Image (spheres, grey):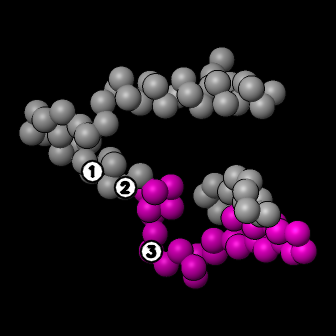
Amino acid sequence: MHGAGKSVLVSMPDQVTVVDHEQEHARRMTPLRMGWAGLQEKFGFEREVAHFLDCVRSGREPLTSGRDSLKTHILMHEILCSAGLPGLE
């Protein structure tokens, strides 16, 4: 991400680097920092997965439908392609 005079590079799941006009700060997720965090917590999808599984069990429609998810993927593809990066091939 870029903005407000800073750039942030996220190298999932283990490092975040913040660069401003004068300094670069990197934070690595060591076992001590993660504690007992599993992959779901590290990637941040634990609640979404639990919600989806609950909807499957109860027969309810998820808050975000597959159609909405597809729109997000198409938008990301357009952003990547306009930046000259590989999109969804």
**Which residue in the rendered view is the most extreme toward the front?**
4
Q: Amino acid at mark 2?
A: Glu
Which residue lies at the image location 59% right of the left edge and 31% below the top edge? 76
CB under 8 Å between discs 1 and 2? yes
CB under 8 Å between discs 3 and 2? no
The dot on residue 58 is none
In terms of sequence position, does the residue under pointer 3 or pointer 1 come before the other? 3
The dot on residue 36 is 3
Comparing 78 with 31, the one in front is: 78
Quick check: 36 left or right of 67? Answer: right
In terms of sequence position, does the residue under pointer 3 or pointer 2 come before the other? 3
Mark 1: few, some, or many residues within 10 Å (few <14, many ≥20)? few
**Which residue in the rendered view is the most extreme toward the bottom?**
32
Q: Amino acid at mark 3?
A: Trp
Count the marks: 3
Mark 2: few, some, or many residues within 10 Å (few <14, many ≥20)? few
**Which residue in the rendered view is the most extreme toward the right?**
22
Q: From where the camera sits, is residue 77 visible? A: yes
CB under 8 Å between discs 3 and 1? no
Which residue is under mark 1? 50
Compared with 89, 57 (above or below) is below
The dot on residue 46 is 2
Q: What span is in magenta?
A: 16-44
Q: Quadrant of residue 78?
A: top right
Q: Quadrant of residue 2?
A: bottom right
Q: Is residue 40 magenta?
A: yes
Which residue lies at the image location 78% right of the left edge and 31% below the top edge? 83
Which element carries disc 3, helix, strand or loop? loop
